[in-house]
Image: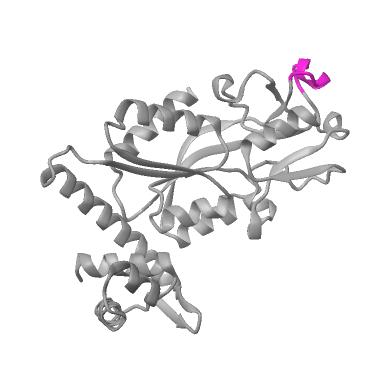
Amino acid sequence: MTLQQLRYVLCVAAKGSISEAAKSLFVAQPSLSNAIRDLENEINITIFHRTNKGVVVSSEGEEFLGYARQVLEQMSLLEEKYITGDGGRQVFTISTQHYSFAVEAFIDLIKEHGGEKYDFRIRETQTHEIIVDVAHLKSEIGVLYLNPDNESVIRQQLKAHELKFHHLFRAKPHVFVSIENPLAKQALVTLDQLEPYPRLSFEQGDYNSFYYSEEILSKLERSKNIMVRDRATLFNLVIGLNGYTISSGVLSEELNGSGIVAVPLDSDDYMDIGYITHSKTLPSRLGSLYVEYLKSHLE
């Protein structure tokens, strides 16, 4: 196995075609095909399924590409630090449910440790994608929650993908509403009081069951439902339509403005918010620092 072969397979995966990758890499297509086949034979897995329309990455290949991506990123850091002598480029990626504290911790990490050159990525995305991102090493850390409704299914998925859940804090449910909403002035809100208002939720794509929902109590039937993909859109609709969403209660006025408030919900439910990591990798320096920033924002 060589670094060149790793570069080849990542390029083929990105292009979706061996011929297109060969053009991009300035190598002959037969040479590229042979290099990939030699690698597959050496590691005894099929990285790509060949089709008439190109190539499709296999499930085994997805995992292999995650490790290959890490190796090449670390090699790039070594070259920049010790060969080009420019100090090296910081590389770090996380995937998270839509939490302002996850974004604030990310901002702190870049401000304090980004340095002169960095490639940082934050993916506010769907719950299942967070699990897949960390499983395939596209992200070092994923931020999500467990509760009685989803824990058995989510932990089963984490086990299947060799991931670990690290508890951060337990949150009681809160309702995010517009500051103009009559419920905003109450000390406690009941589910019955929420019934006239539109319920806003984050859409989960092909995994739209309540097990993957970002909002607890999602099994409850509501007469008005709106699903979105973006946190800013959700907050705009909370204000514009006088809607609500149920979450942890942790808000950032600096990031989200002062137009949204969190009101405790009268419910015995809870959210165990934490982060996931791959069990076969050690935390990087940036990963460890990010977790510390998460904890500081949750105090």
Relative to 52, is 245 above or below? above
Query: What residue appears at the point 65 percent right and 56 percent down from the top-left corner?
Result: 205
Query: What residue appears at the point 28 percent right and 43 percent down from the top-left corner?
Result: 284
Image coordinates of residue 77 in percent, x first then y, are 21, 47
Quarter of the view holding residue 26: bottom left
**Is 59 inside the magenta-drawn segment?**
no
Colour style of the rendered protein structure? one colour
Relative to 290, is 181 above or below? above
Quarter of the view holding residue 115: top left
* The N terminus sits in image quarter: bottom left
In the picture, measured across the screen, residue 65 lies left or right of residue 83, that is right
Would you say residue 294 is visible in this rendering? no
Q: In front here: 288 or 68?
A: 68
Relative to 20, is 121 above or below? above
Residue extent of the magenta highlight: 179-188
Query: What residue appears at the point 22 percent right and 67 percent down from the top-left corner?
Result: 4
